[in-house]
Amino acid sequence: MTRPFGYFVHHQGRGHAERCAAILQALPPSRPVTILCARDDIFPALPAQARIVTIPSLFEPTGQEVAMDWVATPATLHCAPLGWPGIRSAMATIADWFAQADPALMICDVSAEIAQLARICSVPHVKVLQHGDRGDAGHRAAYDGAAGLLAAFHRDLAQPDWDAAMIEKTCFAGGLGVDTQGPDRSAARERLGIGEREEMILVMAGGGGSGFGQAPLGVGARSRPAARWITIGPVVRDWHATEPANIDHRGWVENAADYVAAADLVIASTGNTTCQQILAAARPWIAVPEWRYFDEQHRKADALGAAGVACIRPHLPSSADAWTQAIDAAYAQHRPERQRAMIADAPADDAARWLEALAARLWGTAPHPA
């Protein structure tokens, strides 16, 4: 019997689910996969050999918790509050699955605690690698104890503080989880009602934060009145904002790829999926990192700037002159061929082959045929 793979998915971002689904579609049909996630409604189409087991959220209280915050959290853990019955239930479900399924691998997307649980339960794990200041004991335990690391970005976006041993066991799969070809620009513009010769500036914020402020975007739109400014994702409303008529807030959309393909210039934060979509589309890009745990987006912005694939600003420009300088710099520094080089031809296939080879090495078997 073929040992299954397990896949823990952080449930607060669809990008994690899309990354998971892309890998599962590329794995051999003979490889069963069990996904452990607090939600089952965030996934795109999954292959027949995949199933979802829902577990309680590790992050959201239900009201049944008993406060024990006076007990210190050890340095090896990030989010492990005491007195949470939901966490106990989730960990019990995962540990029971380990015992019953005898998995070949556990793929851990985000959680250092789940990665350490797999290691404690004698199950080899693959940790999804993220940017950020992650030299703390918790991340080091998850990374050092992993059989391999999986990065949904190009090798050239690796952080300079990642040592040779860490790089050696990492599979870099630039573009993993996004459509690496993307929509045609003209067709996307037609679907969105954007004129072929119209300059379109897209402002794009992901779901991991509160979004960009309305006031600085209004200043930007006024500084370039001939352009059509469109925002997708959250925008923070500012009482003092005065917006011109050339900015249009469209909120959450299901076809973000169309907007990226249609844009002449993108202003966006540096979340994982956002980065890969913009690089695949090879658009001029003003990258503005948002607050995230462990300064994830700031370290990713550093890597993007060093690779020469984005114009980095620490925050949205705060004056018309600053907006003009940033936009001019983004167009002048644009290197579409360098951006496209960040995206692999078939990143999901690359990741699936690597996972199969790793499982074969661990268990002394031949890799499953595709």
Image (cartoon, rainbow, N blue to C red):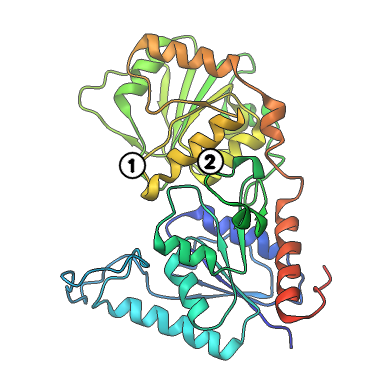
Mark 1 Cα within 10 Å, few/some/many (few <14, many 20+)?
Answer: some
Residue 339: percent from left, percent from top:
66, 32
Residue kind at label 2, given as amino acid type: Thr
The spot of residue 274 in percent (x, y) is: 53, 41
Secondary structure of the residue carrying tag 2 is helix
Q: What residue is shown with label 2?
A: 274
| Residue 351 visible somewhere in the drawing | yes
Q: Which residue lies furthest to the bottom in this view?
A: 100
Q: Is residue 201 above or below residue 183?
A: above
Name which of mark 1 and mark 2 comes first in the sequence.
1
Q: What residue type is labelled 1?
A: Ser
- Asked whether, in this view, residue 212 is left or right of residue 310, the answer is left
Q: Quadrant of the C terminus?
A: bottom right
Residue drawn 49% across and 70% down? 115
Residues at marks 1 and 2, CA–CA distance in whole angstroms? 15 Å
Q: Is residue 221 left or right of residue 119?
A: left
Badge 1 is on which residue?
210
